Structure formats: structure tokens, C-alpha cells
Amino acid sequence: MWTCFLFFILQGWVSEKGPLSAIIEENLYLCTVTIFYEADTTEMALRLSGTLRERGSKLYRLSSGVLEQMSTWRRSPCDAYVFLLAKGEILIKHASVNYLRATPYRQGYKPPLFWNYDAYYIIALIDPSSLNPRDLIGLYNFRKTQNFLVLQPMKSHILIWTHSLISKIPVLEFLDSWVNGSFLNRNRLFAKKFEDFQRMPLRVATFEFAPSVVYARDESGRIVTRLGVDMEIIQGLAVIKNFTVEFVEVSYEEKWGTKYPNGSWDGLMREVYDEISDIGVCNVFIDDFRWTETDYSYPYNFMPGCFVTPTPKPLSNWQSPLLPFSWNTWVSIGISLLVGGPILYFMSVLYKAPGPREFRSLSYSYLYFMAALTTRPLDAVPVSLPTRIYMGFFWIYCLIITTGYSANLIAFLSVTQKAPPIDTLDQLIKSGLKLGGHSFWKTQFEISTDPRILKLASLLDTNVDYLGVFKAVEAGKFAFVENKQYLELNRDARFTYGDRPTIRIARECYLSYNVALILPRNSPLTDNLTNALLRIFESGMMTKWQAEVTKHFREKYAAERSKVSTEATDINQALNLGHVQGVFYIMGLGYVVATVLFVYERLSKK
């Protein structure tokens, strides 16, 4: 009976008018066809290859060695694989393996992928008594393969099956029958399977991270509403694709996830990498580290990574007497005083005509110059013409210097002066601030060739409390790296009192990143969500959603902001002791120096 049945198969299936040839010619005429056969199907494979001789085909004896060679799965613009199975044990074993996890984890090593998820698969079951279509549809790699047909022979016809990818439990779907040399229903055999999800629930992993994901809670802490750009995108996809959403909450402490030395993840990445959830969403950046282990959707946003630093604090008022001039101006004035005193002294000593005896003292000459600089000239006047000319020009110099200093000093005393802001990476490194951020940023910094970025990688503390870190930044003890949108929201909604922000974003940011949904590796959902995402992106609704989140966030923290009193900004305020404390320090320094010299003279002279 088996011999007769096999003869029927060989004559009917692989002829030029058989079902395999018809499927390939009608649906896969531009594809590269690879035929796999077992010992019992050798003649059938040769006949099928012969019918495809004009288009060409590759022929392999089915074995584990063949299936575990990258050359077998070398991709072309369109690939089709035909398996002629009598027992199918080798294929079942091979299709059950998750090759992403099959080899021990090694840093920087990408495991070989012995499967082509984008190809067309046609499985011809030669012996229906030993192999059933249901034995195949639940296998790991077939569950991720969209284009999949199983041909099951019956006594008088051949049934053509596919599987439903939108069901958590693999479901066998009947497509058509091959009867008397033709398809009975003429259904489309490789139709798209994700046009309508038929209200199937999808698990979406996320956590609260404004403005991408924001939760509105009731008094008991239960989530009432999910706001944010990413949440609106998920709801939009659910409407377009007709699925329901089951949210999976990720630990806020773990957030996007950290990779451990053994290759495992925690956080959002664990949900996706271990295929617990169908989609991960929460401002997920596209980067090389996750790219090899997960899939990304079409990007729907982009933003740079920036650094938030403290707003410059007011300078101590003891510096006020020094602020009107820059340091090089003060050095120039000091040099002029250092040189000018001896010149006046030597001109008075070397001139033969009588003159004031005071100028024959070097200390008096210095004092005379100091008096001119402070607009307090002494009674003694030069007698000789060269000395008068010299001092006349010096008085003009002093007039200009003292006038400029007095005018600028008024401004510095009446307006609060602040330290220079941190706007560059060099300033950030030299500031001495502690730097915090998620472990994601450390991996990004470490692959940079910029020595400044590598320095930041060594400074970065990844054990950071996101809820409390902004308070540390506001207190002037910390700098924090995160995406710019997140930093702007917290600055505007939580740390801006009136029009005065107490934290600021440095102008020099790090690289910009695309933002996308993250899905399990080789997920059949990836390509099918692209068109829907494009429709949402092009609608322009993301700007509106962003504005709604900002408004909600400001209302949420309005009471907290009102508790912080703002500083007085009245310019016409009276000068207090704090404003002029610097001059008292100068006077105190003078007292100390004079006292030291007095003691020295008393001890060294009788």
C-alpha cells in the first residue's frame, strides 16, 4: 500500500502540473528555490528539481550538518524552501531551537542564525501516518515564520494548511484543497496575516517615564489613565490593527534593563529578550548593543542625550571688590605699581636739585603711587621737571583706572553675580560634580573615541535614584545624563519657580538617538506594525500628545513649586554688609600685615 501511495505522490505532486510546481510558479516565480529531501523522497526531489530546471534550484539531502551551515541559509531578495518529508525528525529538531540562545553567551559575539524568517516555507508531508501538520506549527522557528504552508495528502486530494500567528496557542488554518489537478477555492496562499488581529491580546511591557509614559493614579495608587506619547502610540496601533493591550509593569528600579556577565537581562529588555511580552515601549533608543538581540520597529521619534547641571549659584560677595576688573587687568595694575614706585624713587635720588625729602624713601614712593590710584594724593609734590612730567601722565592713568573701577563696582555691588554656567563637556569634567545616569549611557560612552566621553564613562555612576537625582542636581552636587525631552519636562514642570529654573541643560549634548518600539528577535509583528506607525507619525499628533503631558505634569507639581519661595529680584535694594564684606576683608588684611611688621620692628630694633 505504501508503494502505491508513494507512486501516486511521485506522479502527482512533482509533475509540471502538480501542486508544488503550481504553488512555486504562481506565487514564487522570482524566488530562489531550495529543496530538502529525505532518503524516502529522493526520487521525488529529483523530479521536482527537474520541473524547475529552467529557473534553477538547489538540492540538499536533509541532515543536521546541512541545516547548520550558514551557506544553506544565505539570503537573496526572495527565498523559498521546500521540504519533502516522510518522517521529518531532523527538521523538527532543527526548527525547535532558538539560535539566539543556543550558544553560550560571549561578549561581542553574535551567534549564527540557521534560519531565514523572511523566506517562504512549503512542507510536503509524504507519509501522513507518521507526521501531522500540528506537529510543525508549534515549533519555535515556524511560530516566527509568516509565510508557511503544509501540504497534507489524503486519499483523493491534498489539503493545504497554514498557521495563525496572531494566536498565543498555535492554530492550524485551512487554506485550500488540490483536487483533480487544480486548487478548489483559489485562495491566496501567502496572504498577509496581520491586517486584522481580531481583538487578540498583546502583552506590552512598560514603566512610568515621563513624558513617554505618565500614569494618573487614584487615591489607592491604582493606575487610572496612561498618558504620554508612547502610550498614545500603543493605543493608536491597537485601533488600527484591532488588538487589545495587556500592560506588563516593569520595575522602575530596573527600567530599560542592564545586561549581566552571563548574557541575561533585567528590566524591559528581559521582558522582550525572554519573549515574555510581545512589545516593549518606553522611550527605547535604537543602539547596537540591543540591536543584535532584539528587533526594533520603525523609529517614531528622535532625541539627543544631554546633561542637566545646577543653575549657576551666586558668587560670594567677598569677591565684589575684585570683580570690576579681570585677572589680567589686576596683574597689569600690579606691575605698574611695582615698577612705578622704584622709578619715582630713583628719579628723586639721582636728581641733584633740592626736593621733598619724602621722595627719597622707597616706601613713600610706593605709598604715593597707592594714594594716586585711590584718588587720595599726598601733600608732597615733585619739584623737578622730569618727575612732574612722569607723575602727570601717571595721574591721567590713575584717573581713567579709578573712574572705570568705580563705575563697574556699583554694578557688581547692586546686581547678584553668578558663576559661569556649565555648557561644554570640558566644563562638566572640570566642575568636580558627580555624574549619574542609566547603565545604557555607560555602554555608549565606552565605545566613543572622544577622550572627553571616555572620561565621562569613568565618572558615571549607574546606581542612581531617578526620583531624587534632580534634587541633588538642584543642590549643586550632581550632574545627570538622560534624553533631552525628559530633562526639559522635569526642568519646566518641577524646578522652574516663576521664570527662574534652578537646574539647566548644558548646550553641548551627546549623540541623538532614534526612538522605537522594541520586540523579540525575529518577531513576525515587527514589519507588520511599520505601516501603522508611519500613519501615526505622519498625522502630527505626537506634538499634541507632548503638550498634553507637559500640562499634566506642571499641574501635578504645582503645589510643590508653590512651597518654594522665590528670591527677591529688586535691583534698587540697599547695600547690606553682605554686599561690601570684601572691603572689610581687605582692611583686615591690612591690619594683619601692619601688625606683623610692627612686631618685627619692635623685636629687631632697640
Image (spheres, helix red, strand yellow):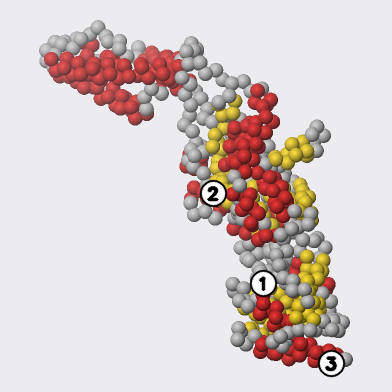
| x, y percent for residue 584 | 45, 14
Q: CA distance from mark 1 to mark 2?
A: 34 Å
**In the rendered view, does 37 fall on the left or right side of 589?**
right
Neighbor class of circle 3 (other Cα within 10 Å; few <14, some 14-19, many 20+) is few
Q: Which residue matches tag 1? A: 119
Give the image quarter of residue 177.
bottom right
Give the image quarter of residue 171.
bottom right
Rendered view: 512 above or below 5: above
| Residue 64 seen in this snapshot | no
Dot 1 amino acid type: Ala
Q: Nearer the viewer, residue 341 or 521?
A: 521
Rendered view: 426 above or below 320: below
Q: Which residue matches tag 3? A: 4
Dot 2 amino acid type: Ser
Give the image quarter of residue 232.
top right
Q: Nearer the viewer, residue 148 or 291?
A: 148
Q: CA distance from mark 2 to mark 3?
A: 67 Å
Disc nearest the viewer among 3 and 1: 3
| x, y percent for residue 596 | 41, 17
Q: Secondary structure at mark 3?
A: helix
Q: Which residue matches tag 2? A: 512
Circles 3 and 1, Cβ within 8 Å, touching? The answer is no
Q: Nearer the viewer, residue 164 or 214?
A: 164
Of the residues under marks 3 and 1, which one precedes in the sequence?
Answer: 3
Dot 3 amino acid type: Cys
Q: Residue at x 75, y 39 (%)?
A: 225
Rendered view: 527 above or below 509: below
In which quadrant of the rendered image does the N terminus lie? Answer: bottom right
Q: Secondary structure at mark 1?
A: loop
Of the residues under marks 2 and 3, which one precedes in the sequence?
Answer: 3
